Image (cartoon, coloured by chain):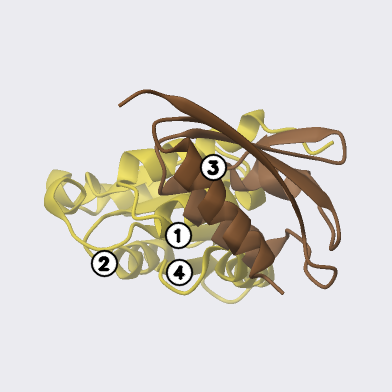
Amino acid sequence: MSASSELTLVRLPDSVSLHARPAGAFVRAAAGFDATIEVRANGRRASAKSILEILGLGADGGTELEIAASGDDAVAAVAHLVELVTGLA
Amino acid sequence: MAAENGTGVVGLVIVSHSAAIARGLAELVAQVAGPDVPIVTAGGGPDGTLGTDGGRVLLAMREADVGAGAVVLVDLGSSVLSVRAALAELSDDEAAGFVLADAPLVEGAVAAAVTASTGAPLAEVASAAEEARNVGKL
């Protein structure tokens, strides 16, 4: 199995900010993967596995998120997180 | 032995001189971390005044440890003494199920609870709380 990397853009639904409950759900999901996962938004970057860093992004509804992962399960991780984000509406 | 062969989710104890701070933080943390993490508060002194109470802390610790141990977070100064007094009441085996985290109260509690909600073991949950010191607010 070779390491891979993956990068995808996904927009937060207009009605959902990546705060509180959604942020917790996002970090819990990210923690299930071995890959290193980074989220970039508003010119900031956060580890997808750190709730404090994710909250620090200040990603309000409608914000464009860049999710980048590297590691054996990077492709699956990004796909799962993109699905989670779009499903937050 | 809870920490070594326990099952279930690591719990959280929030110790504050103010019952209102402890309650409010527990509410915030539960919203971020979800319903599966046991969060127990020990806020205020024995007579309802501002302060901390080792007996109340001990009860909270026993309630928060549902088999996988618990991380204890404190606000200021003498709350540390109350936790140490509570730990002194426990046998070595029982005390091994608890970690008193050297962490900021709000950020530490949020980080610890979300980590606990992933099913992480006691040491990892405690580390998450302590790493909160290194995450800036701005």
The residue that mark 1 highlights is B13
Question: Is disc 2 in the same subunit as disc 4?
Answer: yes
The chain containing the residue under callout 3 comes to A
Q: Position of residue A69 (x, y in %)?
A: 56, 34
Q: Looking at the image, tell me whether mark 2 or mark 4 is earlier in sequence order.
A: 4
* Residue B136 seen: yes
Q: Colour of chain B?
A: yellow
The residue that mark 3 highlights is A49
Tell whether B127 sits left or right of B123.
right
Question: Is disc 2 in the same subunit as disc 3?
Answer: no
* Amino acid at pointer 2: Val
In this rendering, which labeled residue sits more in front, label 2 or label 1?
2
Distance Cα–Cα, label 2 vs label 3? 25 Å
Tag 2 near tag 1, CB within 8 Å? no
Distance Cα–Cα, label 2 vs label 1? 12 Å
Tag 1 near tag 4, CB within 8 Å? yes
Tell whether B126 sits left or right of A69.
left
Distance Cα–Cα, label 1 vs label 4? 5 Å
Residue B118 versus residue A6 in the image, above or below: below
Distance Cα–Cα, label 3 vs label 1? 22 Å
* Amino acid at pointer 3: Lys
The residue that mark 4 highlights is B40
Say which element carries label 1: strand
- Give the brown chain's letter: A
